[in-house]
Amino acid sequence: MVNRKEDDKNRAQVPLKVKYSEDFKRIYATGAIGGFHRYDLRIAFFTDYLVYGENLSDKPSAVREIKVEVILSPLAAVELKKWLDMQIQNIEKMESVKSKSPTVV
């Protein structure tokens, strides 16, 4: 039987090399949609923007462009939540940040 404390101790001593994938992609997202699908959590990140017609009198239309989907195991989703909670707590400490979401009709 594996000693859990000893295993965790050894794991902490293994150096971790971080490298970016050749197809690494950075996007700006204005929101996310998704949910739990049987075995995993799927989160699609999107950007909302307005498209204007050729005539100035035309009403603009809103576009929601889905940029990327991330699929997480339940364990990875829980770890992401912990990390996000910590990051959001730091954001909320800044007085200049107000929690307001843009409205899309």
Image (cartoon, rainbow, N blue to C red):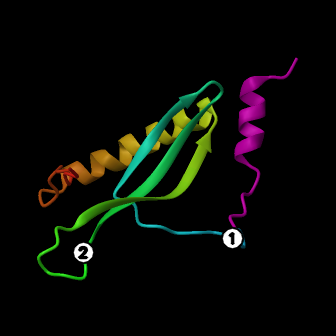
Q: Is 71 inside the magenta-drawn segment?
A: no
Write the start and end of the magenta stretch as one range. Answer: 1-19
Q: Is residue 99 left or right of residue 39?
A: left
| Residue 12 within the magenta-colored segment of the rendering | yes
SS for callout 2: loop
On residue 23, the disc is 1
User: Along the line of sight, which residue is nearer the eye, 89 or 59?
Assistant: 59
Q: Which image quarter is the N terminus in?
A: top right
Q: Which mark is residue 67?
A: none
Determine whether 14 is above or below 53 in the image: above
Residue situated in front as seen by the camera: 61 or 91: 61
Q: Which percent across, then down, holds residue 52?
A: 24, 75
Residue 17 at x, y = what percent? 72, 63
- Asked if residue 22 is positioned above or below residue 54 in the image, the reply reads above
Q: Amino acid at mark 2?
A: Tyr
Q: Which residue is mark 2?
A: 52
Query: At 42% across and 56% down in the image, what residue appears?
Result: 46
Tell whether label 2 touches label 1 (CB within 8 Å): no
Report the residue at 47% width, 67% height from top.
Answer: 27
Residue type for callout 1: Asp
**In this picture, residue 20 sits left or right of residue 44:** right
Residue 48, by quadrant, is: bottom left
Please report whichever mark, 1 or 2, sits nearer to the chain's N-terminal start. Answer: 1
User: Badge 2: few (under 14), some or many (20 or more) residues near its Cα, within 10 Å?
Assistant: few
Picture quarter containing residue 55? bottom left
